[in-house]
Each structure stands twice: as C-alpha cells, then as structure tokens.
Amino acid sequence: MIVFDLSCSEGHRFEGWFGSSDDYADQKAGGLLVCPQCGSEEIGKAPMAPSVPAKSNTRSHAPAETTQVVKGEMPAEVKKALEKLAKAQAKALESSTWVGDKFAEKAREMHYGEADEAPIHGRATRDEAEDMMAEGISVAPLLVPVAPPEELN
C-alpha cells in the first residue's frame, strides 16, 4: 500500500491509500477521487512535509487540518454512502459475468455485433478504456475495488 497526502481545491487535506502509483493515477483519471469533507472532485497530491517516524511504520507529523472525526471512526454519512455504493455494485456484479483481462475484447465483440450483448465486468488498462470510449463503447469504472473470483477468500 502507498499512502498519499491529498488535498482538494477547497484546501481540505486527507490521506488516500492505493495499491500503487498507477492505481492513484487511474482513479484520478477516472474521476473516482473525491474529497471526503466537501465532495470536490478536484483532487491532487498535497505538498508533503518531512515525516520522521517515532516508531516503525508510524507517521509522526500532525495533519494540516484538524477535523471532528475521531481516529478510527468514519462519519456516519460517509459510512452510509459507502454501504449504499457497495450494495449497488454488488447487485450489479451478481447479474454480470467476470471476463477478467478479456474485458476490452468481449466489450468490442458485443459492440460490433459479433457476440450477444450481456452484462460483463473485468479488467482493462486505462489505455484500453480510453480506446473503447473513443470507439463509442460504453464502459464505467467500478467504484469499489473488486477482486477476481479466484482471489476471493
């Protein structure tokens, strides 16, 4: 995991946890990053102050802004919104088929009439998604990360 200090156009600062730098770039490009305080979609990496850990894996610098959120607690409205999102996505995934890395190939086959249309989900690189959108193929990123079926516990 990589932790980025992020800020929005309104000056709110917060942390974002990503699997890699590419995950951050993909989510930012897809408009999936929003400020948890004001909902702004204009998000960027915040200038960072040096961080000297007091103990291993501990961050010693204080946040640039204090909030009313107690460490470890999530505001009720954020939690409720995330639960709704997760339920809606889970329902959509139940009625679609996992196609893995063949997402772009299968989406094109359906778009060009080479295969019957059906709801699918899988993986596509940012370049593949941009190419499909340029061809007029409707694609949408999943809002909550999904593990392939073979990686589920």
Image (cartoon, rainbow, N blue to C red):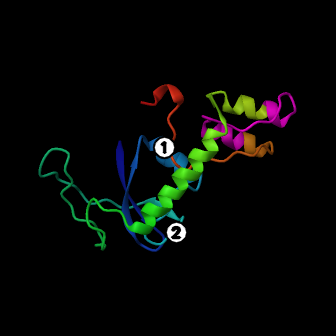
**Helix, strand or loop at disc 2?**
loop
* Residue 45 in picture, x, y percent from top left: 42, 58
**Range shown magenta:** 109-131
- The residue located at (77%, 45%) in the rendering is 134
- The residue located at (54%, 64%) in the rendering is 41
- The residue located at (12%, 52%) in the rendering is 54
Residue type indicated by callout 2: Ser
- The residue located at (12%, 48%) in the rendering is 55
Q: Nearer the viewer, residue 51 or 13?
A: 13
Determine which residue is flagged by label 2: 40
* Residue 21 in picture, x, y percent from top left: 44, 43
Determine which residue is flagged by label 1: 23
Residue type indicated by callout 1: Asp
Residue 135 visible in this rendered orientation of the protein: yes
Instruction: Let me know if residue 41 is in the magenta part.
Output: no
Image height check: is 10 above or below 150?
A: below
| Label 1 Cα neighbours within 10 Å, binned few <14 / some 14-19 / many ≥20 | few
